[in-house]
Image (cartoon, rainbow, N blue to C red):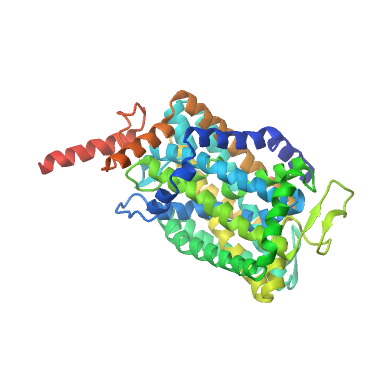
């Protein structure tokens, strides 16, 4: 099974997908005239727009939900894996895919807002919805919905749980070994698993409001605390920082592990971390209450910066400054291009990050990474559940009933358990297949949408024009020639009717 998963992963993550991700980001960056730079101030301002709706969530809550999916194991264990397999130069390519990917995140999240619907008292949207309504290709919408349910419900939760289990073991040891069907498992891992399952069950049965309320508190607090520790490490070693940046940039083009390895691991782990183009962000973006779709698109573009430029860079600097890493080459097993730590250290885990903080803060630093991983991974699992739930809701128009959603909840809880007790490399490969499947469908789809209708670009120009004229900010899809944006059409009609009744 492990060999089969590895083979499928190599096919999904061929060079074609890597360059498609970079190409799509560059394409939308040029078309939006690098909106990720021009509108940076506006992004920050929009974060704190209030929400007075009982149906939607605020822009900040939508950011927190999407960040809960973006800021996860990929930021801690994923960065360590990128360095371990791709060398320090892989970090440069993570930066590149984040910068370009922020424009992709704008496009897909704006599309999520334009074509969202109101179902069962909450907003729903995502790639399945905009493929259905904009491209009018129901088969593509159903294909993405199925891929998202499989990826977020089956393939991806195990990666997050696996990293939590490894972090607990790194901090506390194995404890008493317990014999299970999956082999011997440490008791401390099982305790962590029990905590996750109990809290997970409580939250996922509460809907998007409960998920949003939880993540808006946990995600900013843990991300800020993590970045503060990283800044302390950087400050204490400030003289090494220029050399570290020089190493990252030089190795990006003369990579120790090979140029292809640096790009491949940088892009793969970059997309796994920031999810730009993957099609996950639009689900949370569609749930937000905003005056104009472009507003949430810009907020989601900012979330890519938070994820990769801030959190991933923090991890990379800590690992490289303290030299707590190895680089694996295409050599016989057990040999390294660079070896600074014990050869037995798990490359695909958070071990490098924990060792880096331990070298500066002692046991506190190591424990903090374990705690951060627990919350980052847990909130990411919540985000995965919400994405799976949204796509089940889309498919419910074809397959009625509540049973599919109950099955998804149980499967996610099973996969969390399965991921906790299995090996890192195997679980990461399964997760990569899930990311790759969604990325292939979504990126090809949003490029096709551009050539059919260009709604994301029309939205951006409309929003910019209204801002220049001093407002008020409204969105009229019919005026812009955007079809099937029925939520916004009904909303505009309702506002016009309310205005008439007041007169």
Q: How many marks?
A: 0
Query: In the image, is 496 to the left or to the right of 284?
Result: left
Q: Which quadrant of the figure has residue 443?
A: top right
Q: Give 5 or 361, whichever is nearer the viewer.
A: 361
Position in image of residue 192 (x %, y %): 63, 67
Q: Give 210 or 376, whichever is nearer the viewer.
A: 376
Tell me the residue at 85%/54% (across/down).
336
379 vs 276: above or below = below
Say if residue 390 shows up in the picture. no
Query: In the image, is 151 to the left or to the right of 429?
Result: left
Tell me the residue at 83%/64% (across/down).
342
Q: Give 475 or 491, whichever is nearer the viewer.
A: 475
Say if residue 327 shows up in the picture. yes
Position in image of residue 116 (x %, y %): 39, 39
Position in image of residue 304 (x %, y %): 53, 49
Q: Which quadrant of the figure has residue 39?
A: top left
Classify the position of the C terminus by image quarter: top left
Residue furthest top as drawn: 452
Classify the position of the N terminus by image quarter: top right
């Amino acid at each position: 099974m492990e060999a089969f998963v590895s083979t499928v992963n190599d096919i999904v993550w061929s060079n074609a997908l890597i360059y498609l991700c970079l190409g799509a980001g560059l394409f939308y960056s040029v078309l939006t005239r690098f909106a990720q730079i021009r509108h940076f101030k506006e992004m920050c301002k929009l974060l704190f727009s209030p929400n007075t709706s009982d149906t939607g969530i605020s822009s900040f809550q939508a950011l927190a939900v999407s960040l809960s999916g973006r800021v996860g194991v990929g930021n801690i264990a994923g960065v360590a894996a990128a360095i371990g397999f791709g060398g320090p130069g892989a970090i440069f390519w993570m930066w590149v895919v984040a910068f370009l990917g922020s424009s992709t995140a704008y496009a897909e999240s704006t599309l999520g807002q334009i074509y969202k619907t109101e179902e069962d008292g909450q907003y729903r949207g995502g790639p399945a919805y905009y493929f259905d309504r904009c491209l009018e290709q129901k088969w593509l919408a159903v294909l993405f919905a199925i891929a998202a349910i499989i990826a977020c419900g089956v393939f991806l939760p195990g990666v997050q749980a696996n990293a939590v289990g490894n972090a607990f073991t790194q901090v506390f040891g194995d404890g008493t070994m317990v014999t299970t069907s999956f082999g011997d498992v440490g008791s401390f891992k099982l305790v962590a698993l029990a905590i996750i399952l109990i809290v997970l069950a409580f939250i996922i049965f509460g809907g998007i409001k409960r998920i949003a309320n939880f993540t808006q508190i946990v995600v900013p607090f843990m991300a800020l605390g993590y970045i503060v520790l990283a800044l302390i490490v950087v400050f204490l070693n400030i003289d090494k920082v220029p050399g570290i940046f020089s190493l990252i940039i030089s190795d990006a083009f003369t990579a120790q592990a090979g140029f292809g390895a640096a790009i491949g691991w940088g892009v793969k782990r970059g997309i796994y971390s920031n999810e730009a183009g993957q099609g996950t962000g639009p689900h949370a973006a569609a749930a937000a209450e905003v005056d104009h779709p472009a507003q949430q698109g810009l907020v989601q573009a900012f979330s890519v910066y938070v994820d990769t430029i801030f959190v991933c860079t923090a991890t990379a600097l800590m690992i490289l400054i303290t030299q707590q890493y190895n680089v694996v080459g295409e050599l016989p097993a057990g040999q390294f291009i660079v070896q600074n730590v014990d050869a037995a250290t798990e490359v695909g885990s958070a071990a490098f990050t924990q060792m880096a903080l331990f070298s500066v803060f002692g046991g506190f630093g190591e424990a903090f990474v374990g705690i951060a991983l627990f919350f980052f991974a847990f909130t990411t699992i919540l985000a995965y559940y919400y994405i799976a739930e949204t796509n089940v809701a889309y498919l419910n128009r074809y397959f009625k009933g509540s049973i599919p959603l109950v099955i998804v909840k149980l499967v996610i809880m099973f996969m969390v358990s399965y991921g906790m007790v299995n090996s890192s490399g195997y679980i990461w490969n399964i997760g990569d297949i899930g990311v790759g499947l969604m990325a292939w469908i979504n990126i090809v789809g949003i490029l096709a949408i551009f050539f059919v209708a260009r709604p994301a670009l029309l939205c951006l120009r409309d929003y910019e024009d209204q801002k220049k004229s001093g407002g008020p900010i409204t969105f009229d899809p019919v005026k812009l020639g955007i079809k099937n944006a029925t939520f916004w059409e009904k909303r505009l009609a309702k506002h016009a009717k309310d205005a008439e009744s007041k007169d």
